[in-house]
Amino acid sequence: MALIGAGRIGANHAELIARHTPGAALVAVADPTPSAERLATQLGVDVVELSAERVVARSDVDAVVITTPARSHADLVVEAAAAGKHVFVEKPMAVTLTDADRVIAAARNAQIVLQVGFNRRFAPGWKAARAAIDAGRVGTPQLLRSVTRDPGPFGADPARIPPGTIFLETLIHDFDALCFLNPGAVPTRVTAIADALIRPDAKAAGHLDTAVVTIEFDNGAIAVAEASFSALYGYDVRAEVFGSRGMVTAGDGRCSDMTYYGPDGISVDTARRDTDLLHSAYLGEFAAFVDSIRTETPAVVTGADARTALSIALAAIDSAASGCAVQITDVAVMA
Ligand SMILES: NC(=O)c1ccc[n+]([C@@H]2O[C@H](COP(=O)([O-])OP(=O)(O)OC[C@H]3O[C@@H](n4cnc5c(N)ncnc54)[C@H](O)[C@@H]3O)[C@@H](O)[C@H]2O)c1
């Protein structure tokens, strides 16, 4: 495999592929910045390319893992598919529905495995929740909830965060998780409220760091997704499905099951990074990717799944701006 994009999550994925994914070998890293060289040296990878084009052209590469910024994903997937490479692409797969369709068509025409990085589907709690739903233990889902709170304090420069990031890159995990936990149901209508509660000074320039989104589904279920860019107590991702026969919850920010008892009371340590809290989920998604390639079976998280999550994100952006509920079918027309 080759990695395209040696940034924060690329470094995590490269290490998992190089050292912890049976059946996979990392043979090349591409990034126009010195981070490629650094990462390659650290992992003992010989080939460093400055451009994605060169890595995609290599005959010793069967599959690429794309971890570049969101707006480059669609073109890179199409290019890799045209060269016959299997693709794992980080979310969002694309930022417009037109591009999502282009990616899906390219993967279908090239008959490659295309997997999208919705890692929560591989986290033990979310997998077990889905298994309970599939087994009928929850009954018909009626109320769903999904939460993403990134670890604080928020230190990024708001001016460097592209518009719509809270919907397209953060809440898109929640949108996918809610569809995963409401199997077979189709999202129909979206309402969103968003604000800059963490950096109100940046709101006038379009910065949004806090959001709540409601999603109605065609099976009657109503879901709420919420996100914040700054949870001072750590990385906090959770899900809940309440149905006609019971309820399941998933997610627990604790580092381990250790509880500390001391002079000031009882406390637990919390995970501060997604790569720590969801380590096994990241491992699971690469094991699944390799398995799909080996067995020539479709990816566990498909381009169609990513398109559905994207359509909710685009509807949420529209709703937050207009203050009105947005039909998913209207988003498809706008794209
Ligand atoms: N699944 C998850 O939980 C998760 C977590 C974090 C990030 N992500 C996603 O991963 C993507 C990357 O995020 P990040 O935080 O690692 O970003 P980052 O900015 O840290 O890294 C991106 C890297 O891509 C490189 N790059 C840009 N264009 C390139 C090109 N054409 N060819 C090769 N390299 C190129 C940049 O030089 C940079 O090193 C985003 O889409 C983000 O939403 C997913």
Image (spheres, rainbow, N blue to C red):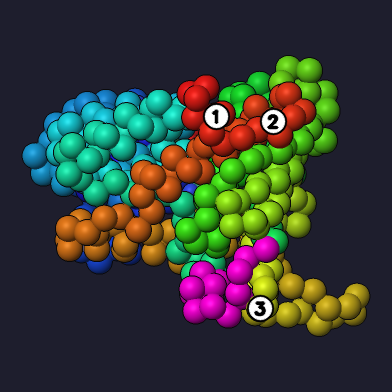
The answer to whether mark 3 and mark 2 are in CB contact below 8 A is: no
Residue at screen point 36% across, 49% down: 302
Callout 1 secondary element: helix
Q: Is residue 105 visible?
A: yes
**Is 73 contained in the magenta span?**
no
In this figure, which residue is indicated by the disc labeled 2?
319
Amino acid at the residue labelled 3: Arg
In this figure, which residue is indicated by the disc labeled 3?
245
Amino acid at the residue labelled 1: Val
Q: Disc 3 to disc 1, how far (Cα)? A: 34 Å
Q: Choose top left, top right, bottom left or bottom right for residue 108.
A: top left
Q: Choose top left, top right, bottom left or bottom right for residue 99.
A: top left
| Residue 312 drawn at (x, y percent) | 57, 39
Amino acid at the residue labelled 2: Ser
Tell me the number on the disc at residue 331. Answer: 1
Q: Quadrant of ligand 1?
A: top left
Q: Which of marks 3 and 2 is nearer the N terminus?
A: 3
Q: Which residue lies furthest to the front in this view?
A: 219
Could you say which is closer to the camera, residue 319 or residue 32? Answer: 319
Using the image, determine if residue 326 lies above or below residue 139.
Answer: above
Callout 3 secondary element: loop
Residue at screen point 56% across, 36% down: 328
Q: Which of marks 1 and 2 is nearer the N terminus?
A: 2
**Is 133 contained in the magenta span?**
yes
The answer to whether mark 1 and mark 2 are in CB contact below 8 A is: no
| Residue 129 drawn at (x, y percent) | 55, 72
| Residue 232 drawn at (x, y percent) | 77, 51
**Apparent side of residue 173 relative to residue 190 in the rendered image (left or right):** left
Q: Give the range drawn in magenta.
A: 129-142
Residue at screen point 61% across, 75% down: 138
Residue at screen point 16% across, 38% down: 110
